[in-house]
Structures are given as structure tokens and as C-alpha cells.
Image (cartoon, rainbow, N blue to C red):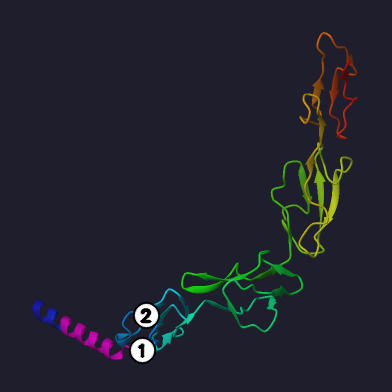
């Protein structure tokens, strides 16, 4: 009984394999130029088969698909490639932008000239050049347009608060209020808050960053500057053969000024 069941199973499995083989979709033979090397077996290609291409000469460039595969309908997905002299980039389609001029193919190192639509700017400041990458020609960097926006770093830097809070992306025309801490300033030492506007070029009208209030003095050596923060003090004394002219101790004030002039030794 067990043997009969086994034979029946093998017979059913064989019939299933035969049925699948008969129903398998075969893709047609691929024809390529003599200077194109085909890797794979296109003569026995059915659903799922993949063939790859490359140029026989390292001085030629592959135009078209680097690989193609056979789909469930018996059709090759991809474009039969050709090998041509020198690399060429095609004029790209840029979302929210347009390529300038009528050139459709570009040679290696040629620059792509394009502009972005209003409210958009180039994603990269560097010029896009036609560049050979492996077996393909690509634009580097990729030409793209992104929406113009201004940003702030969240959480806020030390001594800096923003209104509105918890928002770091702003569109042109949006405003942001910057509030500085007790020992910080913006614009000048007398200003502790300011309103800045996101401009059409993606930059803030006032940099949204508060700075430490500091006082400076260079008394030790020529070119050497000592920086002191608000509330900190400096004490001065002269050697035995000199007399101190001025205050022995000075303090850095919130205005960025010293509480008294820098003393000298007479």
C-alpha cells in the first residue's frame, strides 16, 4: 500500500513538472552587435532568466540596459544595449526644473545647464558633469531641485530659544523670533532678541544664533588676547619696581565692556 502511494505521488509530481514545463513562457532570442558581450543563455530563457551585457572593449561605453530579465509574459524587460565610442549622457528630466538649451546628448566632462522653478533651488551648488561611473555615464552630482527652506538646529543651542519652538524648517516669508539668554547677544551686545525672516534664497535675514558675551584684553604678550565671560573678573599686580595705575580688579559686564579701564604698570 505504501509503495503504491509513493508511485502515485511520483507520477503526479512528474505530470506537474511536465505541465509547468509546457506552460513556461520562453523569451525570444536577443540580438546584439558583435562588440557587445552577452553573459547568460538567451536561447533557453524563460520566466526569471537574467542576461547581462558589457562592452568587449574598455574604450567603449554601454548604452542601454546592463542587464535584462524574462518576465512572466515571455518578454524581455530592458533595452538591448549598444557599445559606442566615448561616454554620453542624455539630457535628464528634472522634477521642478528644466534643462536649458536643445542638447540631448553630452560628452564626458560636459556641464549640464539647468534652472529650477520658482520656490525651488539646486540641491547641489556644484555643477553637474557627465561622468563615467563603471560601465555607465551618469550626471555627477545628480541634477535635482529641492524646495527652498530655512532651517534651525533643534534643540536650540545653549543660550538660545526660538519662537515658535519645536519647529526647524521654515519657508520663504516665514519669521522666527530668537531669544538669547542672560549672558548672550544677537546683532550687537545691547540686543538680546531679534526677529529673523526666511529669504527667497534659503538664508535667514539675521543668523538665528546667540553669542556669548565676552570681554577681551591683551596684556601678557603682543598678539595674545585673554577672553573672559560675563561675571568673571581679572586681577592685576605689578612687579616690585612698578606701581599699578588703575583698578586692581576689573569685571566683565553684560555690555561686553570692563567695569573699569585696563590698568597699567608705571
Q: Please tell me in which quadrant of the rendered image residue 14 appears.
A: bottom left
Question: Where is residue 116 drawn, in percent x and y?
Answer: 72, 73
- For the N terminus, the image quarter is bottom left
Please, is residue 167 above or below residue 93 in the view? above
- Give the side of residue 152 with respect to residue 105, left or right: right
Q: Which residues are magenta?
A: 9-26
- Give the side of residue 140 with respect to residue 156, left or right: left
Q: Which mark is residue 87?
A: none
The alpha-carbon separation of the residues under discs 2 and 1 comes to: 19 Å
Residue at the spot 82% in from the left edge and 18% down from the top edge: 236
Question: Where is residue 147 drawn, in percent x and y?
Answer: 71, 68
Please, is residue 211 above or below residue 228 in the view? below
Question: Where is residue 74 drawn, in percent x and y?
Answer: 38, 89
Magenta-span inclusion, residue 24: yes
Residue at the spot 44% in from the left edge and 77% down from the top edge: 66
Residue at the spot of label 2: 37
Please, is residue 71 above or below residue 186 in the view? below
Residue at the spot of label 1: 27
- The residue lying toward the viewer, choosing from 203 and 154, is 203
Report if the CB atoms under discs 2 and 1 are less than 8 Å apart: no
Tell which tag, 2 or 1, sits nearer the viewer.
2
Amino acid at each position: 500500500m505504501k509503495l503504491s502511494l509513493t508511485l502515485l505521488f511520483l507520477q503526479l509530481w512528474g505530470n506537474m513538472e511536465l505541465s509547468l514545463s509546457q506552460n513556461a513562457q520562453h523569451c525570444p532570442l536577443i540580438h546584439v552587435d558583435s562588440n557587445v558581450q552577452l553573459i547568460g543563455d538567451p536561447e533557453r530563457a524563460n520566466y526569471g532568466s537574467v542576461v547581462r551585457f558589457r562592452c568587449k572593449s574598455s574604450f567603449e561605453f554601454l548604452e542601454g540596459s546592463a542587464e535584462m530579465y524574462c518576465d512572466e509574459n515571455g518578454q524581455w524587460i530592458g533595452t538591448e544595449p549598444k557599445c559606442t565610442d566615448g561616454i554620453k549622457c542624455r539630457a535628464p528630466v528634472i522634477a521642478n526644473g528644466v534643462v536649458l538649451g536643445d542638447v540631448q546628448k553630452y560628452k564626458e566632462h560636459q556641464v549640464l545647464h539647468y534652472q529650477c522653478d520658482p520656490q525651488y533651488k539646486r540641491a547641489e551648488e556644484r555643477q553637474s558633469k557627465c561622468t563615467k561611473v563603471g560601465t555607465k555615464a551618469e550626471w555627477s552630482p545628480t541634477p535635482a531641485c529641492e524646495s527652498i527652506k530655512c532651517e534651525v538646529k533643534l534643540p536650540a543651542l545653549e543660550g538660545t530659544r526660538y519662537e515658535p519652538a519645536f519647529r526647524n524648517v521654515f519657508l520663504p516669508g516665514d519669521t522666527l523670533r530668537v531669544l538669547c539668554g542672560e549672558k548672550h547677544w544677537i546683532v550687537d551686545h545691547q540686543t538680546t532678541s531679534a526677529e529673523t525672516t526666511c529669504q527667497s534664497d534659503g538664508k535667514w535675514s539675521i543668523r538665528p544664533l546667540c553669542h556669548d558675551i565676552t570681554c577681551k584684553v591683551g596684556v601678557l604678550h603682543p598678539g595674545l588676547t585673554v577672553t573672559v565671560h560675563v561675571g568673571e573678573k581679572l586681577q592685576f599686580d605689578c612687579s616690585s619696581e612698578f606701581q599699578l595705575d588703575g583698578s586692581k580688579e576689573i569685571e566683565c559686564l553684560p555690555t561686553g565692556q570692563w567695569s573699569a579701564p585696563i590698568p597699567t604698570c608705571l
